[in-house]
Amino acid sequence: MLSRLRGSLLGDIVDDIAAYLHERGHTPKVAQAYLCGAGHFAHWLDRERLSPKAVSEATLASFMDRHLAGCRCRVPHGSRRHLRPALGHVLAVLRARGWAAPPSLPAQKPVDRLLNAFTVYLQETRGAAATTCRRNAEYARRFLEPRYGAAEVTLQDLGPEELLRFVLEQTRECAPGTAGLIRSALRSFLRFAHVHGLCDASLAAPGSARAVAARKVSRCSRTTWWRTVRSAWRGVEPRDATGAQRSSRAAVSRSAGTRRGHDSRARRQPRSE
Ligand SMILES: [Zn+2]
């Protein structure tokens, strides 16, 4: 079996495979079973005229899922349960040798690309610290991913009411300090998007920014809080009565109920911050 393997396309790495299995602490018996599986795989590579340099997870899957079903190879097969790990070891050695290509990274989504650009902007244009870059990108991701998933990010379609709803949802349960970081991250992202011509100027404009800020709603009195909400509401609602407007109002009202409860609880308790 070993001599057959040495004469195959994997012949040059037989010793590497053996050393790899030894280093991993496999017993000689198990190593023999793996080498047997490697021999079967090498025979199939020969037959299919596939170069070891082209071996990847897809090649292993093709061998396991398609070839084995109708396999008539006249070579030792070894046990089926050892075969899959044996192929994994072969691929690991091929990669360690630099023969097989490293595993491909999952393709980046448009959201990932945009956030990478945002991070570069924060680092290079704004001089932000690495922690700030990571945090702002993470909060911006919370906003973008549920909306766009794997699709292109089209911020031109974005309305201020969506931003306000996001901020209210995200900050409802957090400490004031965290809420401030979330709002700051979103403002920073909108500034970046505006500078790069990705969103309408009105989104990054001061008026809209005031709405997005939704400011210190957790610490002010109910009267002040309502004034803040109404002010933000006026700033974000379209003038005509639409379904979007009603849903925006409902979202703000739902939030109001929660916030009122939160505030009344907060007033009963001494401040700890
Ligand atoms: Zn076969």
Image: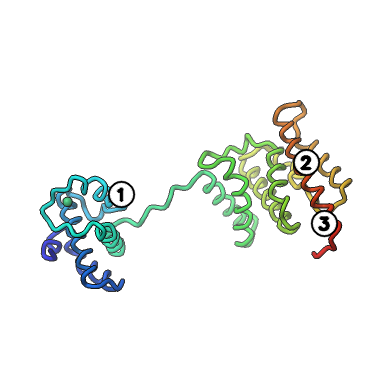
Q: Nearer the viewer, mark 3 or mark 1?
A: 3
The crowd level at tag 2 (other Cα within 10 Å; few <14, some 14-19, many 20+) is some
Name which residue type carries label 2.
Gly
Residue at point 75%, 47% (across, down): 213
Nearer the N terminus, badge 3 or badge 1? 1
The crowd level at tag 1 (other Cα within 10 Å; few <14, some 14-19, many 20+) is few
**Residue ID for mark 3:** 266
Numbered mark located on residue 58 in the image: 1
Q: Secondary structure at mark 2?
A: helix
Q: Does the rendering let one see residue 45?
A: yes
Residue at point 77%, 28% (across, down): 239
How far across and down, in percent of the image, does residue 70 sit? 18, 45
Nearer the N terminus, badge 2 or badge 1? 1
For the residues labelled 2 and 3, say whether their Cβ atoms are less than 8 Å apart.
no
Q: Nearer the viewer, mark 2 or mark 1?
A: 1
Work out whether residue 273 or residue 36 is closer to the camera in this orientation and state it. Answer: 36
Name which residue type carries label 3.
Ala
Numbered mark located on residue 207 in the image: 2
Q: Nearer the viewer, mark 2 or mark 3?
A: 3
Residue at point 62%, 62% (across, down): 131
Residue 168, relative to residue 16: is it above or below?
A: above
Q: Left or right: 241 with respect to 142?
A: right
For the residues labelled 2 and 3, the Cα–Cα distance comes to 29 Å
Q: Does the rendering let one see residue 204?
A: no
